[in-house]
């Protein structure tokens, strides 16, 4: 079974679609900025160390899936650019989502509170999305889904009912406070998808705290957007990046006034 102190499987070991979540370390010290398994190059960690971690991750996965031959990484910028991964690239592509129809090629998304979303359609395509509040407000989910299935909207939604989506470790609502500006932009993105937001749903998505501030449920926003695109099979890991010491949390480490935050990864690949 694929599971050690650095990798948590989110799908059954015999599934043709594999989704895995990496950890910083087990056990973890909250005083340790980068932990033992930071996978991001942009957070001022030693690049040699990060590249070694990425190689170690591939080798660990290959122990259980020997045909897996590469991991694709993105240079994520909280935008809504979607990249079609067709061949290895020497440098990370500037995008916040990517998709592929290749088997034994893993797509990675790095996070430290944002919502990582993995997709699989019924025709062999897989996708990986980095969905922070900005990506959700910019409709990164709908844009990625439309890249995977760019046909008639009504037929697409019926077709997508058999798609699957997985949500990896992300910050829980209780720890993610946002202001009115963030709330307004996300609610506007839901309205564009013809999602009706009544007072009850609005409060469940954005629970009011102090004046003009709310606790935001990013994962629930993501699920609503996935559902609006026709994807109803959504599996939430319910792993909380803020409270679970196995994971990186940008918000927690900022509150602790630490100088940097590492990144974990959620990956998806097909074995056939």
Image: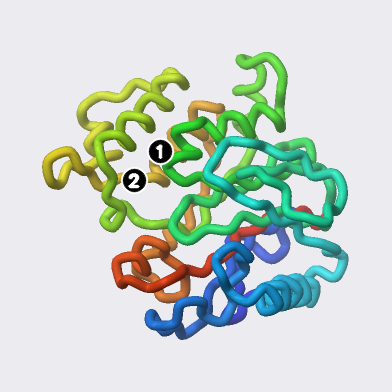
Foreground of the two, 263 or 161? 263
Locate residue 6: give its quadrant: bottom right
**In this view of the protein, can residue 64 be seen by the observer?**
no
Q: Give the image location of residue 219, x and y in percent.
A: 42, 46
| Residue at 39 percent of width and 42 percent of height | 220
**Residue 3 against residue 191 in the figure, above or below:** below
Q: Give the image location of residue 74, x and y in percent.
A: 68, 52
Foreground of the two, 254 or 197? 254
How many residues crowd around disc 2 within 10 Å: few (fewer than 14), some, or many (20 or more)?
many
Helix, strand or loop at label 1? It is helix
Q: Give the image location of residue 212, x and y in percent.
A: 17, 38
Foreground of the two, 255 or 1? 255
How many residues crowd around disc 1 within 10 Å: few (fewer than 14), some, or many (20 or more)?
many
| Residue at 32 percent of width and 71 percent of height | 257
| Residue at 73 percent of width and 37 percent of height | 122
Residue behind mark 2: 217
Helix, strand or loop at label 2? It is loop
Asked if the residue under mark 2 is in contact with the one under mark 1, i.e. CB atoms within 8 Å, the reply is yes
Locate residue 253: give its quadrant: bottom left
Residue behind mark 1: 221
Relative to 123, 174 lies left or right: left
């Amino acid at each position: 079974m694929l599971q050690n102190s650095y990798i948590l499987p989110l799908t059954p070991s015999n599934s043709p679609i594999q989704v895995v979540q990496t950890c910083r370390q087990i056990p973890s010290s909250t005083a340790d900025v980068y932990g033992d398994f930071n996978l991001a190059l942009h957070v001022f960690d030693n690049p040699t160390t990060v590249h070694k971690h990425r190689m170690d991750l591939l080798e660990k996965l290959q122990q259980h899936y020997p045909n897996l031959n590469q991991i694709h990484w993105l240079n994520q910028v909280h935008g809504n650019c979607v990249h079609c991964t067709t061949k290895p690239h020497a440098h990370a592509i500037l995008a916040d989502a990517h998709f592929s129809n290749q088997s034994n090629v893993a797509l990675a998304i790095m996070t430290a509170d944002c919502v990582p979303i993995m997709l699989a359609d019924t025709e062999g395509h897989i996708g990986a999305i980095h969905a922070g509040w900005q990506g959700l407000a910019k409709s990164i989910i709908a844009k990625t889904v439309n890249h995977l299935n760019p046909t008639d909207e009504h037929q697409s939604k019926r077709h997508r009912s058999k798609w699957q989506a997985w949500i990896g470790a992300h910050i829980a609502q209780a720890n993610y406070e946002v202001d009115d500006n963030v709330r307004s932009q996300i609610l506007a993105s839901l309205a564009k998808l013809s999602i009706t937001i009544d007072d009850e749903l609005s409060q469940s998505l954005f629970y009011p705290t102090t004046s003009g501030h709310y606790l935001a449920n990013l994962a629930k926003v993501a699920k609503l957007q996935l559902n609006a695109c026709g994807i109803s099979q959504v599996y939430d890991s319910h792993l909380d990046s803020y409270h679970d010491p196995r994971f990186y949390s940008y918000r927690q480490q900022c509150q602790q006034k630490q100088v940097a935050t590492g990144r974990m990864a959620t990956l998806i690949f097909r074995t056939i």
